[in-house]
Image (cartoon, rainbow, N blue to C red):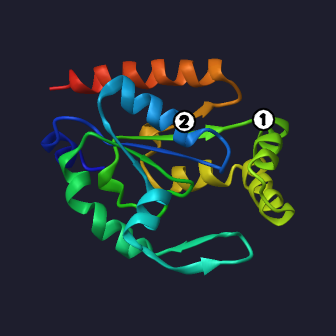
Amino acid sequence: MAQGDSNKRKTPNILITGTPGTGKTTTASTLAEATQLCQINIGDLVKEKNLHDGWDDQFDCYVINEDLVCDELEDIMEEGGNIVDYHGCDFFPERWFDRVVVLQTDNSVLYDRLRKRGYSETKISNNMECEIFQVLLEEAKESYPEDIVVALRSDSIDDITNNIATLSHWLTTWQTVP
């Protein structure tokens, strides 16, 4: 993100990403409550505003239309004060985010979470491979300045609590930057 862009905002934007089942929505909603930032769950937004190109039967999800999502969010993101929650990150404009958080979860914990969601074996396998090979961490590092990307462990409630404290502290520090 260009420094000039973030200085126009009074509050930063945070992207919380990671493999499905790593706790993105739980973390984003808890952080939004703690900081009074606005949570934007991209999956919900896509459904509510029909920002998709149909349904993928193999992975049991909507095929997101990235251009429509970006168009929908442009003005909101420029204002700042948002926590975006989505399992991908490479299509969002770099200028939108001041912090990119990649949640990571131990494979056995993640597998159990995905099974409890009722995911198909194909969907579980795909998501487990993404986590094992750190696909989303690499995607974030390739898409955003490395100094704004942070990987956080998300195996337990204690981890989420610690992550909220870490991000809340970062938010306070960001607000004090001249």
The residue type indicated by label 1 comes to Asp
The residue where tag 1 is placed is 106
13 to the left or right of 139 = left
Percent position of residue 151, x then y: 58, 36
14 to the left or right of 16 = left
78 relative to 34, above or below: below
Q: Give the class, few, some or many, for how many residues have Cα within 10 Å of label 1's Cα (few <14, many ≥20).
A: some
Quarter of the rendering containing residue 13 = top left
State the residue in front, 116 or 59.
116
Q: Which residue is drawn at 61% across and 52% down?
A: 136
Query: Nearer the observer, disc 2 or disc 1?
Result: 2
Percent position of residue 50, x then y: 41, 73
55 relative to 178, above or below: below
Percent position of residue 1, x then y: 31, 50
Helix, strand or loop for disc 1:
loop
Percent position of residue 60, x then y: 69, 69
Q: Which residue is drawn at 71% across and 70% down?
A: 59
| Quadrant of the drawing holding the C terminus | top left
State the residue in front, 141 or 127.
127
Quarter of the rendering containing residue 24 = top right
The residue where tag 2 is placed is 26
Helix, strand or loop for disc 2:
helix
State the residue in front, 146 or 117.
117
The residue type indicated by label 2 comes to Thr
Q: Residue at x 78, y 54 (%)?
A: 118
Q: Give the class, few, some or many, for how many residues have Cα within 10 Å of label 2's Cα (few <14, many ≥20).
A: some
Residues at circles 2 and 1 in contact by the CB criterion of under 8 Å: no
Question: Which comes before the other along the chain, label 2 or label 1?
Answer: 2
